[in-house]
Amino acid sequence: MFIDSVRIEVEGGRGGSGAEAFRREKGVPRGGPAGGDGGKGGDVILVGDAGLTTLSDYRYRRHHRAERGRHGGGSNRTGRGGRDLELRVPPGTIAVDDDNGEVLGELLAAPERLVVARGGRGGRGNARFASATHQAPRRWEPGEEGQHRQVRLELKLIADIGLVGEPNAGKSTLLSRISRARPKIADYPFTTLTPNLGVVELPDFRSFVVADIPGIIEGAHDGKGLGHRFLRHIERTRALAILLPVDDEDPAAVLAGLRDELAQYSARLAELPFAVVFSKMDLHPPEAGEPAVEAPAAWGTYRLSAVTGKGLDAFLEGCWRQLRAARRDEESAEDPW
């Protein structure tokens, strides 16, 4: 099952308490304070793991606590620190404090790490409180409680090109043809119930990642249909390919509706570069001429058939050129000099 949003409870380990102890040594008749400090509690850390694709491991395991620190001992022995608790998550995971909405961080690649709950500080032993005027203190400190948080984990798949369209636009069929992904394909709406990723391999060792997003319908940004649950996954893409089946009665209206749903969900989605892709060209009669819509903002218009393979090469090369341009723009923005 594909799980892309979970809530978990995390707690750093409690610090160990400081010790109250005094030396008893030969040749030191009066001894002195020798209580060691307590150990620090362990942290709860998210770790990116490229082998994971969903957050399903945390669907039923909600409570996660790191190990507590050990208490200090005599002879100025410091207690052992608690072991950190590592929670492995797929790349693209965002951690949000569920109480105040603060974004704690995100893990874009493996093996990035993010501390979401820090362990408590260990308490000081009585040796720490010795002074010239107070040479036999009996004061010591308990360990501090670890940080406690309710954390919401959200997964946003990381892809280069996002395939967007209404149900039965041919997105899954196209993905299965251009990559080794094998999404479920059928002739009824909402066949795709979860996003699918596929790696497209081109000659000269070139490759990029394509995401197939479940069908988007009117009102998706308000929660209608299935696509609204997965609109977040195309926020990370560099470009979109909007599929318009040639058997649609009004492709221009479909394009306008999809663009409007993207804009209603996120202003960033509306700004992403997009291509217009007429799919299912094998159903288009040759005498009808080439389908077209007015889309001056599109970086390309393509006509293809995932069944016959017609137009696929031109589409994939166009995607590669667009991605190269997008990467150059990103590098220029990061290094303006």
Image (cartoon, rainbow, N blue to C red):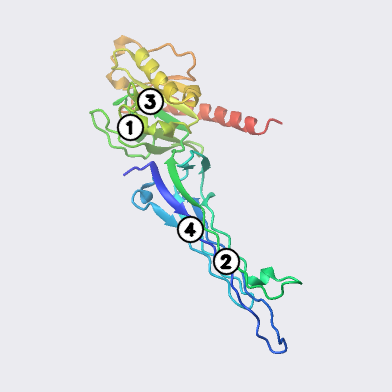
The nearer-to-camera label among 2 and 4 is 2
> Sequence-wise, which precedes: disc 2 or disc 1?
2
The crowd level at tag 1 (other Cα within 10 Å; few <14, some 14-19, many 20+) is many
Disc on res. 39? 2
Q: Badge 1 is on which residue?
A: 172
Whether label 3 touches label 1, CB < 8 Å: no
Along the viewing direction, whichever of 118 and 260 lies nearer the viewer: 118
The amino acid on which the numbered mark 3 sits, given as a three-letter code, is His
Left or right: residue 68 versus residue 255 is right
Whether label 3 touches label 4, CB < 8 Å: no
Along the viewing direction, whichever of 219 and 147 lies nearer the viewer: 147
Rounded to the nearest angstrom, the CA distance separating label 4 from label 1 is 38 Å
Q: Badge 4 is on which residue?
A: 85
Whether label 2 touches label 4, CB < 8 Å: no
SS for callout 1: helix
> Sequence-wise, which precedes: disc 4 or disc 1?
4
Q: Badge 3 is on which residue?
A: 221
Give the residue displayed 40% in from the left and 45% down from the top: 7
The nearer-to-camera label among 3 and 1 is 3
Rounded to the nearest angstrom, the CA distance separating label 3 from label 1 is 22 Å
Residue 117, compared with residue 254, is above or below; it is below
SS for callout 3: helix
Rounded to the nearest angstrom, the CA distance separating label 2 from label 1 is 54 Å
> Sequence-wise, which precedes: disc 3 or disc 1?
1
Give the residue displayed 36% in from the left and 25% down from the top: 222
Along the viewing direction, whichever of 206 and 273 lies nearer the viewer: 273
> Sequence-wise, which precedes: disc 2 or disc 3?
2
